[in-house]
Image (tube, rainbow, N blue to C red):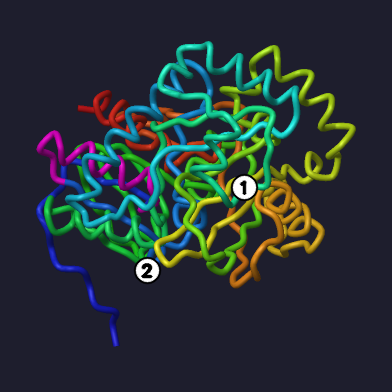
């Protein structure tokens, strides 16, 4: 019996290949310009990096300059569309804790920049009053109100559903794209679809489309380990980060003061640095905590989670919160990783290849997509 064919639809202005956060962001930017959009994705549902993360839209600590500006704009878009799409903002802000004096120096230097203008220093007395679950005292603490957190596993499907229902975006799922040319794509079953423009957002699929272009960019893949802990019996007012984040996020790590902290961490936490571990702790509506993460790099990372890495993550948690509650879920995620924040290339006239290569898809995709779509129409 022949396979059923999709019904004929009007030719869209834009075809987006990939329904991860960056692909959905392109669809949103296009419909806001009054354009008709079709999104093609090989999976039946959201399954990749866009749902295997914290859902943490991180502004504070992003690389100074353009990336920080992209994150600020993207957080603004999240706040605009979340109530329209039925997406709950689970937490607001960020609490950045300094465990070591060198980390406090980094926090002080960061607070003195334009990136710290909307942040406030907290004393240990203020921390005790507002965050009684913390195992203080701490050398310094900084609170930001710029960041936000959504539950990515539900937010991405809700965003796609809203784009379809409220804006007429057509989704064709479970269909793989085998070729892209100016003005058209070809699906693996031979179907050819035409559009005025095409945006290819492949995430960490580095070998299916425009392989040579991607290879020239020096992009590989990063795999991370994450945990969900059972509800601890308290509410965390904001996501939390600590010392290891200060040598990982470029908004902090690029400051001269970060050099002394990195030197001390090399002495005191070499295993955590080796595994790319730093603490992010966020809380879900049901009270459970999402905690991570780690970073290892390879073209095809092994899918196996290591107990030593989990122990290192939980060790960072223990230093901040005390004994962790039971682990109720474990998973790995992967994302494209390269030397820049992202790549946007024009491999063919009317075609854009866009990949966030810094693990900041949730944090920067909306603003990046606005730039890409503006350049195409």
Name the image quarter holding residue 154. bottom left
- Residue beneath the point at 51% across and 27% down: 62
Q: Residue furthest right?
A: 267
Label 1 crowding class (10 Å Cα cut-off): few <14, some 14-19, many 20+? Answer: some
Q: Position of residue 354 (x, y in %)?
A: 42, 36
Q: Is residue 220 above or below residue 293?
A: above
- Is residue 33 shown in magenta? yes
> What percent of the width, then of the height, locates residue 308?
82, 58
Residue located at (53% from left, 33% from top): 213
Other residues around mark 2 within 10 Å, as few (<14) / some (14–19) / many (≥20): few
Check contact, mark 1 vs mark 2: CB within 8 A.
no
Looking at the picture, tell me which residue is in the foreground, 199 or 157. 157
> Where is the C terminus found, in terms of image quarters?
top left
Q: Bounds of the magenta span?
A: 19-36
Q: Position of residue 3 (x, y in %)?
A: 29, 79
Disc 2 target residue: 44
As displayed, is residue 78 above or below residue 252? below
Q: Nearer the viewer, mark 1 or mark 2?
A: 1
Which sits earlier in the primary sequence, circle 1 or circle 2? 2
Q: Would you place residue 266 above or below residue 37 in this image?
A: above
Who is closer to the viewer here, 224 or 273? 273
- Residue 72 shown left or right of residue 226 in the figure: left
- Frontmost residue, 7 versus 17: 17
Q: Main secondary structure of the magenta part?
A: helix
Label 1 to label 2, Cα distance in Å?
Answer: 41 Å
């Amino acid at each position: 019996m022949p396979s059923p064919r999709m019904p004929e639809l009007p030719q869209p202005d834009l075809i987006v290949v990939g329904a991860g956060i960056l692909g959905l962001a392109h669809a949103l930017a296009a419909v806001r310009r009054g354009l008709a959009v079709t999104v093609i994705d090989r999976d039946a549902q959201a399954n990749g990096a866009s749902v295997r993360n914290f859902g943490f839209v991180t502004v504070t600590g992003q690389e100074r300059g353009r990336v920080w500006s992209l994150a600020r704009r993207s957080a603004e878009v999240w706040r605009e569309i979340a109530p329209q799409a039925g997406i709950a903002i689970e937490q607001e802000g960020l609490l950045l804790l300094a465990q070591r004096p060198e980390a406090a120096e980094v926090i002080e230097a960061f607070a003195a920049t334009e990136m710290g203008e909307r942040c406030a220093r907290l004393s240990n007395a203020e921390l005790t009053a507002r965050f009684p679950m913390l195992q203080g005292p701490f050398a310094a603490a900084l609170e930001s109100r710029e960041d936000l957190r959504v539950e990515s596993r539900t937010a991405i499907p809700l965003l796609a559903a809203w784009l379809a229902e409220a804006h007429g975006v057509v989704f064709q799922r479970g269909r793989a794209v085998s070729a892209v040319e100016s003005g058209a794509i070809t699906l693996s079953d031979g179907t050819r679809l035409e559009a005025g423009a095409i945006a290819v957002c492949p995430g960490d699929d580095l070998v299916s489309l425009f392989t040579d272009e991607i290879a020239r960019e020096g992009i590989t893949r990063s795999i991370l380990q994450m945990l969900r802990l059972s509800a601890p019996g308290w509410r965390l007012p904001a996501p939390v980060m600590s010392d290891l984040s200060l040598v990982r996020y470029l908004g902090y790590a690029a400051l001269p003061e970060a050099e002394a902290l990195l030197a001390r961490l090399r002495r005191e936490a070499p295993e955590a640095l080796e595994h790319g571990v730093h603490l992010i702790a966020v809380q879900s509506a049901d009270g459970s905590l999402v905690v991570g993460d780690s970073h290892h790099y390879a073209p095809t990372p092994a899918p196996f989670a290591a107990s030593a890495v989990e122990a290192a993550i939980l060790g960072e948690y223990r230093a901040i919160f005390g004994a962790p509650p039971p682990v109720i879920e474990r998973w790995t995620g992967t994302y494209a990783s390269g030397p820049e924040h992202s790549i946007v290339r024009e491999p063919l006239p009317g075609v854009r290849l866009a990949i966030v290569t810094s693990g900041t898809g949730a944090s920067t995709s909306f603003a990046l997509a606005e730039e890409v779509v503006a350049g195409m129409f």
